[in-house]
């Protein structure tokens, strides 16, 4: 029997409610069950009405299912957030410096800080953009940093997302719905707003328009199409930013530029916020069978006619193998100590580390290097002997494909459950914007494991979402 | 050697397409082995643009046709003075780290046969250069030059199994053997002035990265390193990535391709 | 804000599909009314066959049901069958799918109207057939199409997207009126000697009824029904909401709005104006002199040419 670890409850215990939650204690306790049920179904109806359905990118699943929404907000004090804000921006800056470096001089490799093999042989490293400097030297314009918490002052970065992190529409819609349903909460508590995100995103994208762009840049979001599971988010963002939502077929290349097919004829596009993978961007540069992309787009990009966000090749920075080195990147490029910690990670590709992993499978979380969505993952303390043994075989067979981390005592947050209110494990994904400036809206997407004791917050595996509050200064 | 190139590629579409976009890699590489006296790429009716030199040192340009297109004619002509550097790509400016070329692709995926061929070939080779030569020789021996047995979609593994192929298959297989030994390797396209048996003036070979020497060309089809009879255009992971012309057409037309190349020595 | 050509096409097609669903229901009505008359030469069967021919689905129907042209089969095929691209169900489904893509260009009311139509159709498909009368299905379709059009009219912003919705709608309606008339003349009447007979008269009235125009016709023309009066009413009368000239003028009006908004007059406007001008100058005598069928065939081609031009100019994204 595994000893049950004690988890940090973000709200504190009944005797000692932690300050950011003080406004919520009586609100939740005084809420009659019936009222709560009414509100819950009201929220669901609202979500269904606006059409936001289950589909966090890469997780698949029934496209028409709603992601469960928990009405109990997750709260950070202004002090807590200040530290997160600094840590996240620091990380976003270092990741971008890394990308700029490995596509030009490769100083960090030459200095022996990161093995060249891990960078240059990485599948996400794009030879095609070597030596091409994107506008302002920014590669990852929207950095989603997945964080977990284990104590009052203990935050860990679980994962970086440098390509096209999804879920920001939930951050905005969750807030919208909470404000609609519980306006008094927002009168009684001073909660920092998040609704400036779309405007900030647009400003960020406009700020990385190529030098060839004269006048106000035209920004467009490139989506794989309305069959994509994250299409709602694409159209939501396009709508909120007031920019066109285009598919590959809406764009074409001619001369030095990329053009959008409109009812008034071709219109030049200066910045493309793409929500499709590198491999599908341009059949003349990457996968020749791609129907989603724009033939010739990469040539226009590389000759400075259009900006692409995130820049092709940005994925090399968020690989799980590179993740281990992010604290070193921060020291190398910024000369600073990392504000946010990494989760200790063992690479099964290294034989001594693999040995440790195999000896301690029962206590570790094992993940596939390229896996996502909580699939293909072993949570040692929660697994049966058979499951552990089957993972042992998998690791031995293909060690490069696995990393392991300690089982973290993820913090909990009060959550409405059938029986009332109970602690459930949560994580956090804030969205950091990098353009002319580095900006971070005070908030993010909190995912919650709705199943008791579960540590898996992925929506494909019984996870839900919460509104995330940051108390104003 | 002074080489005159005339290279005409004709695409015909029936019924006509609604548009054509091509990415061209049709300009001779700049390195100590080549001095370009004159070079011209002509495409009547096309809009040209979006040109740049990529990280591998290749000049790339984009051309498009909008509206109904029934044919595209790409005409390349020019004169290059070449020098034999024993295959060494000396004085070539590029930024891509060689390690980026240790990567399997659709055409260069390795398997046991390829691994065995590679390991067997380098047994006894004492220097990286000797290893590279040994690999090229082994591939040239394992795959006989027989046109018509393979096509543009044939992989290294398939060509090796058949034991017959053309320069594309030799290059892919050589790359695959090098990669499984963690030796950076890439596909190179260009022209060949040849009076012998293999008179395919449009040619392809491989380059392997040899420590202390840099990139060195190996033509397993002709069992030699590129000399003054070769003109180098560009490189890539494989035949698709390195293709001199990569294009996409919109529409339902059937494409017919006609290529006419001549490489003549104008030395007296 | 810039309208993507693809999205303009989606809006255009919403207009067309909604009108098409409406047309199929109206054809249905023609068939069911004609089927009530027992004394036509081919019996019941003939009436349904002409409906299939008029909707251009004879071949698809034969592939599925052979020559078993019974009301129930025709109903299944023309109303519910998703394999039949011309069925009411397919048209509603297509309209809704196009709407889903351009949802942010639609008001929530317009989206709701289209989405509810889709949900209700799914409900109807699940309903036991014995509980549905053909009249209910026809009524449902006409009511649904009216609701969608009314919502568009009442709630959509008067910007270019609104014009594309309407252009699709009116071009489709022009086409459908021409085809319905042609059906009567060419398909329903198997032999020339029926012309002027009681049957002929009955069929003309059915057409009017199908076009929801029998009262309007009586009000405008009074007295007995003649081919000339009907042709005048459905082709040349500006008061008739489904007449060719009304549809052409509405299309022209919306195209002119686009030209103003974009500050650019194109061949689409020229072509539409020519269509209106020709219909304004021609008389019913001219039409019959040319031959009604010939005239209608020509009109159908002109409408389709205009549609193609609009496609080139606005919907391809390459026109200037």
Image (cartoon, coloured by chain):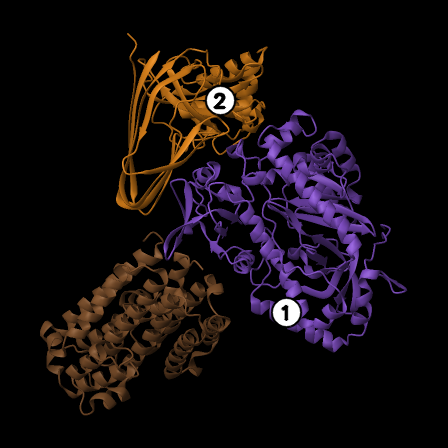
Q: Which chain is orange?
A: B
Number of the label disc, if any, that sits on residue A44 = 1
Q: Residues within 10 Å of mark 2 (few under 14, many from 20)?
A: many
Q: Tell me how far mark 2 sits from mark 1, CA to CA.
A: 60 Å
Q: Where does label 2 land, which residue?
A: B174
Q: Residue at x 54, y 38 (%)?
A: A134
Which colour is chain C painted? brown
Q: C243 and B226: which one is in front?
A: C243
In front: mark 2 or mark 1?
A: 1
> Where is the C terminus of chain B found, in terms of image quarters?
top left
Which colour is chain A painted? purple
Q: At numbered mark 2, what does the secondary structure look like: helix, strand or loop?
A: helix
Rendered image quadrant of residue B190:
top left
- The chain identifier of the residue carrying mark 2 reads B
Q: A199 and C182: which one is in front?
A: A199
Look at the picture and state if B17 lies above or below C36: above
Measuring from the top left, give residue B123's x and y in whole percent: 58, 14
């Amino acid at each position: 029997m595994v000893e049950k670890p004690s988890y940090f409850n973000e709200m504190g215990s009944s005797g000692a409610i932690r300050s950011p939650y003080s406004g919520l204690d009586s609100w939740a306790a005084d809420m009659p069950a019936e009222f709560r049920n009414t509100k819950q179904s009201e929220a669901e109806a609202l979500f269904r009405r606006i059409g936001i359905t289950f589909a966090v990118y890469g997780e698949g699943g029934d496209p028409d299912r709603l992601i469960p929404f928990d009405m109990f907000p997750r709260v950070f004090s202004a002090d807590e957030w200040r530290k997160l804000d600094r840590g996240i921006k620091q990380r976003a800056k270092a990741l971008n410096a890394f990308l700029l470096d490995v596509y030009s001089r490769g100083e960090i490799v030459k200095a022996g800080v990161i093995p060249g093999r891990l960078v240059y042989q990485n599948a996400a490293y794009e030879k095609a953009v070597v030596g091409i400097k994107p506008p302002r030297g920014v590669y990852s314009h929207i950095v989603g940093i997945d964080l977990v918490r284990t104590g009052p002052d203990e935050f860990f970065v679980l994962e970086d997302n440098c390509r096209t992190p999804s879920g920001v529409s939930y951050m905005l819609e969750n807030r919208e719905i909470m404000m609609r349903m519980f306006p008094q909460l927002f009168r009684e508590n001073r909660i920092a707003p998040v609704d400036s995100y779309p405007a900030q995103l647009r400003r960020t994208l406009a700020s990385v328009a190529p030098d060839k762009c004269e006048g106000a840049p035209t920004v467009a979001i490139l989506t794989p199409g309305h069959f994509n599971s994250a299409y709602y988010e694409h159209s939501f963002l396009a709508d909120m930013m007031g920019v066109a939502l285009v598919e590959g077929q809406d764009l074409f290349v001619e001369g030095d530029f990329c053009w959008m097919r409109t009812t008034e004829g071709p219109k030049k596009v200066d910045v493309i916020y793409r929500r499709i993978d590198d491999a599908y961007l341009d059949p003349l540069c990457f996968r020749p069978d791609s129907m989603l992309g724009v033939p010739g787009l990469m040539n226009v990009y590389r000759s400075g006619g259009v900006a692409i966000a995130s820049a092709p090749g940005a994925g090399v920075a968020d690989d799980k193998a590179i993740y281990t080195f992010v604290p070193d990147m921060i020291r190398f490029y910024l000369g600073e100590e990392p504000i946010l910690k990494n989760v200790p990670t063992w690479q099964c590709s290294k034989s001594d580390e693999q040995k440790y992993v195999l000896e301690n499978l029962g206590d570790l979380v094992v993940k596939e290097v390229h896996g996502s969505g909580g699939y293909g993952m072993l949570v040692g303390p929660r697994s049966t002997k058979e499951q552990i043994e089957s993972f042992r075989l998998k690791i031995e067979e293909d060690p490069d494909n696995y990393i392991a981390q300690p089982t973290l005592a993820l913090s909990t947050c009060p959550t409405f459950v059938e029986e009332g209110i109970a602690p459930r494990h949560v994580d956090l994904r804030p969205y950091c914007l990098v353009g002319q400036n580095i900006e971070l809206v005070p908030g993010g997407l909190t995912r919650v494991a709705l199943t008791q004791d579960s540590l898996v917050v992925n929506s494909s595996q019984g996870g839900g979402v919460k509104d995330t509050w940051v108390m104003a200064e | 050697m002074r080489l005159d190139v005339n290279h005409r590629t004709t695409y015909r579409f029936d019924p006509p397409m609604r548009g054509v976009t091509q990415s061209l890699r049709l300009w001779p590489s700049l390195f100590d082995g080549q001095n370009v006296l004159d070079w011209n790429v002509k495409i009547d009716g096309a809009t040209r643009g979006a040109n740049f030199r990529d990280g591998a040192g290749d000049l790339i340009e984009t051309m498009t046709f909008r509206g109904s297109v029934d044919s595209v004619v790409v005409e390349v002509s020019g004169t290059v003075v070449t020098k034999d550097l024993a295959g060494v790509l000396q004085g070539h400016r590029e930024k891509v780290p060689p390690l980026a070329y240790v990567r399997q692709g659709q055409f260069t995926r390795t398997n046991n046969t390829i691994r065995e061929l590679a390991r067997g070939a380098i047994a006894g080779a004492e220097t990286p250069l000797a290893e590279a030569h040994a690999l090229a020789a082994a591939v040239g021996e394992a795959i006989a030059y027989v046109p018509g047995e393979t096509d543009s979609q044939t992989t290294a593994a398939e060509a090796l199994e058949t034991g017959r192929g053309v320069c594309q298959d030799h290059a892919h297989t050589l790359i695959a053997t090098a990669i499984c030994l963690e030796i950076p390797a890439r596909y190179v396209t260009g022209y060949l002035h040849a009076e012998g048996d293999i008179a395919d003036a449009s040619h392809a070979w491989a380059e392997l990265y040899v420590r202390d020497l840099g990139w060195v060309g190996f033509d397993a089809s002709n069992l030699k390193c590129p000399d003054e009879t070769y003109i180098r255009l560009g490189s890539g992971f494989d035949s698709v990535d390195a293709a001199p012309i990569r294009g996409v057409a919109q529409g339902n037309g059937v494409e017919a391709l006609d290529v006419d190349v001549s490489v003549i020595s104008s030395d007296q | 804000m810039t309208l993507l050509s693809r999205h303009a096409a989606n809006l255009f097609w919403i207009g067309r599909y909604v009108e098409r669903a409406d047309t199929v229901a109206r054809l249905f009505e023609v068939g069911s009314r004609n089927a009530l008359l027992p004394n036509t030469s081919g019996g019941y069967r003939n009436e349904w066959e002409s409906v299939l021919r008029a909707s251009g689905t004879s071949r698809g129907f034969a592939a599925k049901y052979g020559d078993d042209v019974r009301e129930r089969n025709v109903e299944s095929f023309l109303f519910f069958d998703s394999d039949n691209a011309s069925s009411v169900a397919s048209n509603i489904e297509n309209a809704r799918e196009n709407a889903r893509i351009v949802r942010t260009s639609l008001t929530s009311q317009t989206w709701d109207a289209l989405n509810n139509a889709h949900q209700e159709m799914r409900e109807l498909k699940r309903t036991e057939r014995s509980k549905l009368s053909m009249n209910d299905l026809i009524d449902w379709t006409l009511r649904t199409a009216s609701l969608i059009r009314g919502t568009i009219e009442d709630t959509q912003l008067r910007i270019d997207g609104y014009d594309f919705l309407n252009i699709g709608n009116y071009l489709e309606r022009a086409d459908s009126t021409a085809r319905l008339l042609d059906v009567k003349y060419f398909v329903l009447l198997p032999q020339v000697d029926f012309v002027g007979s009681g049957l002929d008269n009955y069929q003309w009235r059915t057409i009017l009824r199908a076009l929801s125009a029998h009262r309007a016709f009586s009000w405008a023309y009074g007295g007995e029904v003649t081919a000339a009066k009907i042709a005048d009413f459905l082709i040349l009368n500006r008061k008739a909401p489904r007449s060719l000239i009304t549809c052409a003028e509405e299309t022209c009006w919306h195209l002119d709005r686009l030209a103003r908004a974009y500050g650019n007059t194109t061949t689409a406007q020229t072509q539409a104006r020519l269509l209106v001008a020709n219909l304004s100058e021609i008389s019913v005598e001219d039409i019959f002199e040319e031959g009604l069928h010939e005239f209608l065939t020509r009109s159908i081609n002109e409408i389709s040419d205009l549609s193609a031009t609009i496609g080139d100019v606005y919907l391809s994204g390459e026109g200037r």
